[in-house]
Amino acid sequence: MEPSQFYTGLVADLYAPLKSASPDPEPYVRFIGEAGEPALELGCGDGEPLIELRKRGLDVEGLDASADMLERCRRAAAQEGVEVVLHHHLMQHMELSRRYRSIFVAGPSFNLLPDDNSASQTLSRIRAHLDPHGSALIPLFIPTVTSRDKLGRAREFRSKDGVTLRVTPVAQQRDEHRQVQTTMLRYERSTPDTNEVMERPWVVHWWTQAQFYDLAAAAGFTIAAVLDPDDRPALVTADAFTFRLTLSA
């Protein structure tokens, strides 16, 4: 399956009620405040934190590969009474009409790129769309292995009208050489009369800090900082870190 097809259909429908947490908008408010507007969120999905940033009056646009998720974003924005500019593109192929002072990813979307070639293409497209005085913010993580006792354990949501939504990791494979982890997820939506089930592979590709440093430098970026989730310099052993990039002179 193409990574861009993961968040479609039933998976897109279940994404919001079953997600483990919503992204805190404050780091992106600060980032845009420092780097400037206009801004572009890559992998904006159904609108978090994009819609909150727009509610605060920031000039932020969104881009995502899933038409289903973008439609959910449009509906959510309309409910909040804000206008959003959305682009339906793969990150590695985006071709937009303006440059941005701030380009950022607000979740694990960059890790969904399947290989180094896709990552290099995406960095090249970010560079092409970044204002000469702008910055890019890319959070990354190194996935941990799901323990056997957690395989088969569902995350569940029950609505007041009797609908049960469920996502369950049922199997996992990890390739340390390719730095790819594939988790087979089972999505279910059950009503008193129906039961809809779909299984999809969630594929995550990871990089060490040194590996991503080399990719970013090769794409023409200067690494301004590598930060941990608390905005402090990340330890080299960290399994979650964010690269802040500027254009090389």
Image (cartoon, rainbow, N blue to C red):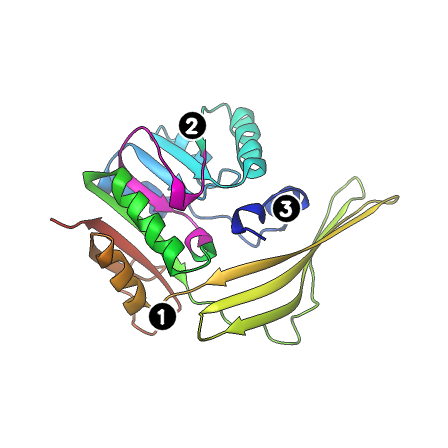
The residue segment tinted magenta is 88-110
The image position of residue 132, as x and y in percent, is 17, 39
Q: Which mark is residue 238?
A: 1
Which comes before the other along the chain, label 2 or label 3?
Answer: 3
The image position of residue 194, as x and y in percent, is 85, 45
Disc 1, SS = loop
Dot 1 surroundings within 10 Å: few (below 14), some, or many (20 or more)?
some
- The residue pinned by badge 2 equals 85
Residue type for callout 2: Val
Please, is residue 248 above or below residue 209 in the view? Answer: above
CA gap, disc 1 and disc 2: 35 Å
- The residue pinned by badge 3 equals 17
Which comes before the other along the chain, label 1 or label 2?
Answer: 2
The image position of residue 170, as x and y in percent, is 68, 66
Q: Is residue 231 left or right of residue 4?
A: left
Residue type for callout 1: Ala
Q: Is residue 87 found inside the magenta-colored segment of the image?
A: no
